[in-house]
Amino acid sequence: MSDPRWRRRRALRIALISLGAVVALVLVLVATGAWLIGREATLQRIVVEAEKALQGRLRIEGVTGSAYDHVAFDRLVFRSKTQVVTVEHGALRYRLEPLARRFTIEDARAAKMTIETIGKPDEPSTEPETLELPSAARIDTLRLDAVHLDAIELVDGARRTALSGADLEGRYASEGGTKRWIVERFAVTTPWGKVDGSATLAAARPFAIDARLLAEGKAFDVPYRAPLSIAGRLADLQLASDFMVSDPAERPVSGHADARVLPFREQPIDNAKLHVAGVSPKRWKAGLPEADITMDAVVRPSPVAATDGGEVGSNPFDATVHVVNTAPGPVDRDRIPVASLDADVHGDSLAIIASKLVADLGAAGQLRGEGGYRFADGGTPSFDGDVRALDLRAIRTTLIASRFGGPLAVSRRDGIVRLDTQLADNGRSVKLRGEFEGDEVRIAEAAVTLGNSRARVSGKVDLARERPFALEGEVD
């Protein structure tokens, strides 16, 4: 009869050998699985399955690397109903820490990204339910250590905008019990200068946001610096900027702008305010007059759009405009003969109409009426109103002193300026109906009355000719 202790030792030895064999088998399977997963062919198979799952909306070409830590590709194309996003020559290096539920993108870069708009959404965009990562991802922390794009091109029909040198650093994490997306640094170079900034966005409603941007550079050869703050929540943003531009003599012109923006509405701008001070045309271009202009404007969305030939305008707005020139004067003294301008403005994609337009000409009198500008046919401005107490000498010192008053209509279309006015002043009157086109003046009717004398003229004046006048008329 065998020793019981020997039998126990033998059973323990067999159990240990079996356990070791199982562990070895598991290790072999894990190593085999790890080798299989890490193979480039496996990565390519994963890509193929992803393309199938997205039903042709995703296409990735020239994939190399390993599913463990790095991927590279020649071309990635993602299509939606409204956009096509193409990324060329991209590379991604990352690190996954499953136990810590952390995923880190150590470096991501691409030679070019093109975003092409191919249509408008069928329905207006809506506020998302959540911005949290899906629980199935089992990731609590996502880090973006370095994301770089050499070039970005935005394409919308024939319009193309090229950006360059885009960099991004950020993270997604739970801080203080709140999950947030945090952009630690963002930078991009545009045709008008460089934009840098940072931002924080809560991942749950109401999606509190706090962002700071700085745009600086040159726009239309004008240096500018415009810090921008964005606060509020994703569906209701408050924007504010104290900006500065420099004239060619490097003298600053300061301003302030703020706006309430509702991104998920058809007309996103709820209201906007603009204040600019210290503007003088002479500083910007030699030959223009001197002035000291301050402008204030308030813009609000409007429920009413204009129509032009049956076409209905989009993005209608209402605005009030107040302009003050503290240095008015006659044009031959290098001044602008306007002391202030006030108007109520209605506009949309078709036209801008200024009603209740009042131009205080200072000593030169006043203009009242309605003005407009339609964008069709190369732009068609117009004014229809009346003149009050117009002093020609206050406009130009070589003209006569006067107190003219009466109707005035001016418009321009297809390069032709049309003028129709009839002004009177204590026994003097001027009536003029005609057209101006380049060097040519076509006078349909002109009449000047001085006391009991009257002169009537019609015809044409062509300033490009050696003998410009072709007029006929009579004097009473």
Image (tube, rainbow, N blue to C red):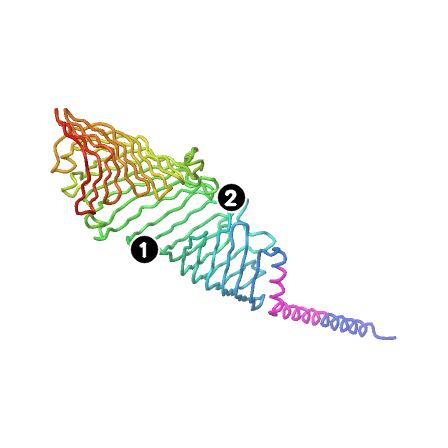
Q: Where's residue 346, x and y in %?
A: 37, 35
Q: Is residue 89 left or right of residue 12?
A: left
x then y, percent, for residue 188: 40, 57
In-front residue for pair 185/404: 404
Question: What residue do we see at 27% from left, 35% from top?
Answer: 410
First along the sequence among labels 1 and 2: 2
Q: Quadrant of residue 391?
A: top left
Which stretch appears magenta? 22-49
Q: CA distance from mark 1 to mark 2?
A: 32 Å
Write down the quadrant of residue 14 in the picture.
bottom right
Q: Quadrant of the N terminus?
A: bottom right
| Amino acid at the residue labelled 2 | Ser
Disc 1: which residue: 217
Relative placement, left or right, of 398 versus 16 is left
Disc 1, SS: strand
The picture places residue 363, in percent across and down from the top left corner, at 16, 32
Q: Which residue is mark 2?
A: 125
